[in-house]
Amino acid sequence: MIVWITSSGRSGNTFFRVVLHQLYGVNTYAAFQAAEVLVTAGAEALVGYQKLPVALQSAIISGNSGQIRVALDQLEASSEIYIFKTHAMAHELFGTNYRAILLVRDGRDALASYANYLVDIPFDSAAFAERRRRMAGSSSELLDGHAWIRLIKMLAVAGAKTLGLRRWMISRQIDRLLSEESPLYFDWGTGNRSWLEREPKPVVVYFEDLTRDPIGTVTHAVNSLNIGLKLKSGGSVPSFDELKQRYPSFFRRGTSGDWRNHFSPAQEELFWLKHEEMMKALKFCM
């Protein structure tokens, strides 16, 4: 059996899976426009991260959509539960209609958080250490010009932050995320719509409910799926604040309204121009 845990970026997907793993002991996978960012920080155990099943990984490498669908259907037919994090739109998942949980967050907060992520996570100390480790352990990496360019870029970004340019860098990322001409375009409205209009409907979880009452919110979502998961004894769930203290780059704020610290009036106006319909559908106010 497959369950998609889906969302736009920075909408609580990782925190949901942390709580899910701690309460039920289930492992999770990441695929289809989603990677497990916690691996870089050595914190993948928080979500019970697993490498993709071999047959599915081989199908993905092949690039053959038919093979991928066959591999997914085989997992769906299994008595074992496979929980996948994904940021793909519903129509991008090879015609599957498996059970799904959709996490939704005010698009402005999700976008602002993603802009912070783009400025911080790829260039933080853990990413830098991982890049150095890979280059030191592989002659091909050491001789790869792109690897050196990446390392230099990490140093340049760290230097720019030291000079007080972080706020400007975030604003630049927000511009890119709002531009349909950019490969980074953050199509928050279309992504959520693809899941909300899909059959069967996903179980919808709001980010604010998840951070306010993680145990109650996750157990309600799991019960709504009716997949027979049982709570494990002795499960201990870290709060968002505890995770933020341990991994501040990954669990940054966990609050609503932080977009006000990052959006210019022009950026907010452009956001509403693109996403007003979905913001109203999900009852997020102006």
Image (tube, rainbow, N blue to C red):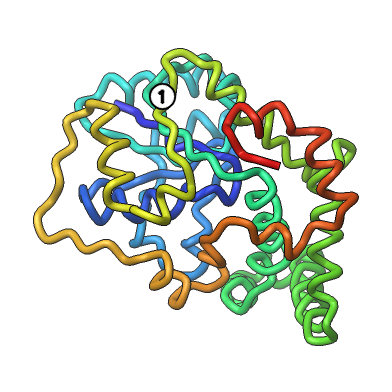
In this view, the residue farthest toward the front is 286
- Where is residue 84? Give x, y as percent: 41, 38
- Residue 155 percent across, percent down from the top left: 77, 80
Quadrant in the rendering for residue 121 = bottom right
User: Callout 1: 10 Å neighbours few (<14), some, many (20+)?
Assistant: many
Residue 166 vertical position relative to residue 44 in the rendered view, above or below? below
Find residue 67 and report its horizontal and vertical position in percent. 49, 20
Q: Is residue 59 left or right of residue 147?
A: left
Q: Which residue does the image show at 48% across and 47% down from the upper left?
A: 207
Residue 52 vertical placement versus 125 (above, below) = above
81 to the left or right of 138 = left
Report the residue at 87% width, 53% height from top: 265
Q: Give 258 or 171, whichever is nearer the viewer.
A: 258
**Quadrant assignment for the N terminus:** top left
The quadrant of the picture occupied by the C terminus is: top right
Q: Give the amino acid type for the residue marked by disc 1 in the picture.
A: Leu
In percent of the image, x 40 and y 50: which residue is there? 210
What is the residue that sits farthest to the bottom in this orientation?
162
Does dot 1 land on a helix, a strand or a loop? helix
**Front in this rendered view, residue 157 or 17:** 17
Q: Along the line of sight, which residue is nearer the eye, 215 or 250?
A: 215
Residue under numbered circle 1? 72
**Total count of labels:** 1
Image coordinates for residue 259, horizontal then vertical, percent: 70, 57
Q: Is residue 110 left or right of residue 37?
A: right
